[in-house]
Image (cartoon, rainbow, N blue to C red):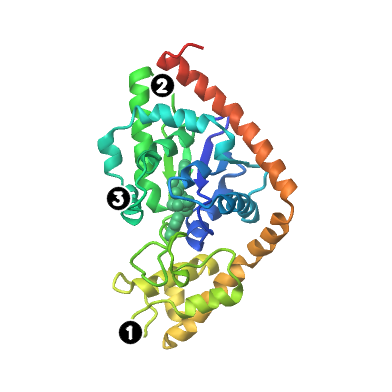
Amino acid sequence: MTGDKKTVFSGVQPSGNLTIGNYLGAIKNFSKFSEEYKTFYCVVDLHAITVRQVPAELRKRTYETLALYMACGLDEKKNTLFVQSHVPQHAELGWILDCYTMFGELSRMTQFKDKSAKNAQNINAGLFTYPALMAADILLYQTDVVPVGIDQKQHLELARDVAMRFNQIYSDTFTVPEGYINTDTMKIMSLAEPTAKMSKSDPNQNAVVYILDSKDDIIRKFKRAVTDSDTTVKYSDEKPGISNLMTIYRAFTGKTYEEIEREFDGRGYGDFKLAVGEACADGLAPVRDEFSRLIADKAHLEAVMKSGAEEAAYYARKTMSKVRRKIGFVN
Ligand code: TYM
């Protein structure tokens, strides 16, 4: 809780161009909370450096991620929008929570296993302790609800365990957070390999639809999407490619799976893929337009980051003073 409102926190890494997975699984859900909750939406640059980043790119993407938050409907007056490294309490609590997170717990994290397999030359300690920093992000604001895609569920459970462990040792200090996972869009799959998650770090550009892709690119990518040798548009575990496209189409049109099956009954995949591409491109057009307007005004973005960080730091300091006292640090 922050004041009389329940608190929402979530974050996105500025580690690549954002995808329709990030949009449908996370960012699109963020604005649902803006009116009734105290909301903190963070660009998590400290997390991004667990994988090597080109400095100029990281800086550029940090601005872009903030502008995308705003372009996706997050009003800076109703939401606290900020950059993680601007509030040093994230790193401070991150270190403290490292000391309450077990090696065994971190070793079981599937994202650590996946990412270390992909970055065998750079399995750094930050990659390993990443979930403790994520717990710090969440617990710093006494967060009640964390909207994320399903791939973050394991990290969120760890944050809950760490909060409960700390509370048990030192008495109530942190709110134990709950996840908010939109089951309709919790895992958007790759267009090239529909059994794998769509990921912003995928080197295959055709596997991923970026929020800022042009209409032509979006339509081209959906046309090339991997499906199956059948011809019926039907939602089924045996048809992961078509089912993923149906999930995306449903998210952009509001139609049900039954309605989609009826709409494309007897029409083949070509028609269907074109319709998905058009619905997606048209759905994203307002976001792209708004983004172009926002990204051109760097001074405004900097003002938003600055006031967001000041607001966030006010709450972060409150939690930190409690944590420091409970642990036994001299003030
Ligand atoms: P990140 O940057 O990988 O992804 C941002 C958000 O997008 C969701 N997401 C997806 N949802 C559906 N389908 C997909 N294909 C897909 N790909 C990504 C993610 O679940 C996430 O919600 N560790 C986090 C960032 C983070 C964070 C936090 C999140 C740091 N601290 C505190 C919440 C609270 C991450 O790497 O997200």
Q: Earlier in the sequence, mark 2 or mark 3?
A: 3
Residue on which the image places disc 1: 230
Looking at the picture, tell me which residue is in the foreground, 61 or 228: 61
Residue on which the image places disc 2: 172
Q: What secondary structure is found at the residue carrying circle 3?
A: helix
Question: Eyeballing the image, is 220 above or below 306?
Answer: below
Q: Earlier in the sequence, mark 1 or mark 3?
A: 3
Residue 20 % position (x, y): 51, 62
Is any atom of residue 147 visible in this view? no
Amino acid type assigned to the residue bearing label 3 in the image = Lys
Question: Looking at the image, is mark 1 or mark 3 nearer the viewer?
Answer: 3
Image-based side of 82 in relation to 272, left or right: right
Q: What secondary structure is found at the residue carrying circle 1?
A: loop
Residue 142 % position (x, y): 49, 30
Cα distance between the residues tagged 1 and 2: 57 Å
The residue at the point 73 percent across, 56 percent down is 296
Question: Eyeballing the image, is 290 above or below 142?
Answer: below
